């Protein structure tokens, strides 16, 4: 998968993407990442990417010319990219969107700054995406966040696909709690069932925890979840626990 980003701060990406899972995906060629400096597509000697807004008012607006020229140049080189503008006014980015975008051959993100971009750039944008109902000063952090979430769904990026499938949201459930060594720390024990070696019991215990957490913390997600056999076994075990508590 190829991912390009149009930004006035290309160095910001280098610093973050050289760590962890995403850096290995880039090194191994599973993800081809390019941070493109918008200033390379300006047409004045000051390399200006912003200007005052027509109609007056405060703030600056990112000029359409450099963005449109940069998109043309990227389009002329390789597969046609799916163009995303990061914006607090867009549809909220979530796990489903990350999975959907991971199937695209090529993505091109445009990072806004100041008051945002000249509205006429929207004529070449396929989708506007937000990372939440708050306003940041630029689109770079939203892009990093989205690229990280999207790349986890690109086959091969996360070594163990089972862990991606078991992560929160994938099956409309939150993940279960995790424990590692030591078995006891400051008097806090690991639940016995996880040490039992009984895989069926462990799976039912984890599912029970996932269901409990999702019901408690995210009932909106829980309502979408379709119960499978393990969920049913986990719910039965929850009922049994409840009955024991009442008796
Ligand atoms: N005037 C714009 C508005 O109120 O809708 C906000 C502009 S913001 C200061 C500058 C840039 O940061 C935006 O163009 C966008 O690229 C990025 N940005 C800010 N908040 C964002 C969010 N919640 N999600 C995605 N991008 C965001």
Image (spheres, rainbow, N blue to C red):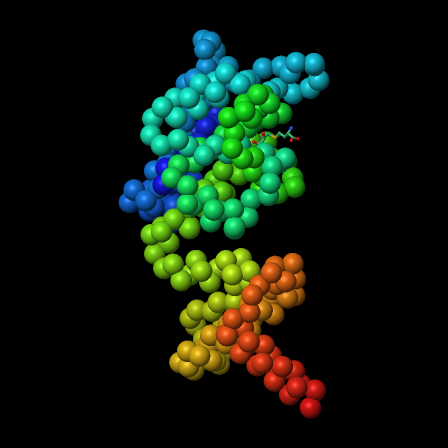
Q: Position of residue 49 (x, y in %)?
A: 51, 18
The image shows residue 88, relative to residue 159, as above or below, that is above
Q: Position of residue 74 (x, y in %)?
A: 39, 25
Q: Residue 4 sits in which quadrant?
A: top left
Left or right, 91 with respect to 44, comes to right
Q: Position of residue 18 (x, y in %)?
A: 37, 41
The image shows residue 43, relative to residue 225, as above or below, that is above
| Ligand 1 quadrant in view | top right
| The N terminus - image quarter | top left
Q: Can residue 12 be seen in this snapshot? A: no
Q: Using the image as rendered, state which of residue 96 and residue 151 is in the foreground.
A: 96
Q: Residue furthest top?
A: 45
The image shows residue 234, relative to residue 11, as above or below, that is below
Q: Residue 105 sits in which quadrant?
A: top left
- Residue at figure coordinates x 61%, y 19% from the top left: 60
Q: Residue furthest bottom?
A: 247
């Amino acid at each position: 998968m190829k991912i390009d980003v149009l930004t006035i701060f290309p160095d910001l990406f280098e610093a973050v993407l050289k760590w962890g899972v995403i850096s290995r995906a880039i090194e191994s060629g599973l993800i081809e990442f390019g941070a493109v400096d918008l200033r390379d597509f300006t047409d004045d000697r000051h390399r200006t990417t912003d200007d005052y807004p027509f109609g007056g008012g405060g703030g600056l607006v990112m000029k359409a010319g450099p963005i449109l020229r940069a998109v043309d140049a990227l389009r002329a080189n390789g597969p046609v990219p799916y163009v995303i503008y990061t914006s607090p006014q867009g549809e909220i980015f979530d796990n489903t969107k990350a999975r959907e975008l991971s199937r695209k051959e090529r993505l091109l993100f445009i990072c806004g700054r100041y008051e945002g971009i000249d509205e006429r750039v929207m004529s070449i944008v396929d989708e506007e995406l937000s990372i939440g109902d708050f306003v940041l000063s630029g689109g770079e952090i939203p892009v990093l966040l989205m690229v990280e979430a999207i790349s986890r769904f690109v086959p091969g990026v996360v070594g163990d696909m089972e862990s991606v499938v078991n992560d929160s949201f994938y099956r409309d459930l939150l993940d279960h709690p995790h424990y590692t060594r030591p078995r006891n720390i400051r008097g806090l024990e690991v639940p016995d069932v996880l040490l039992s070696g009984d895989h069926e019991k462990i799976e039912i215990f984890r599912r029970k925890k996932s269901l409990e957490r999702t019901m408690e913390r995210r009932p909106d997600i829980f309502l979408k979840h379709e119960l499978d056999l393990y969920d049913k076994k986990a719910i039965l075990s929850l009922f049994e626990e409840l009955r024991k508590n009442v008796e």
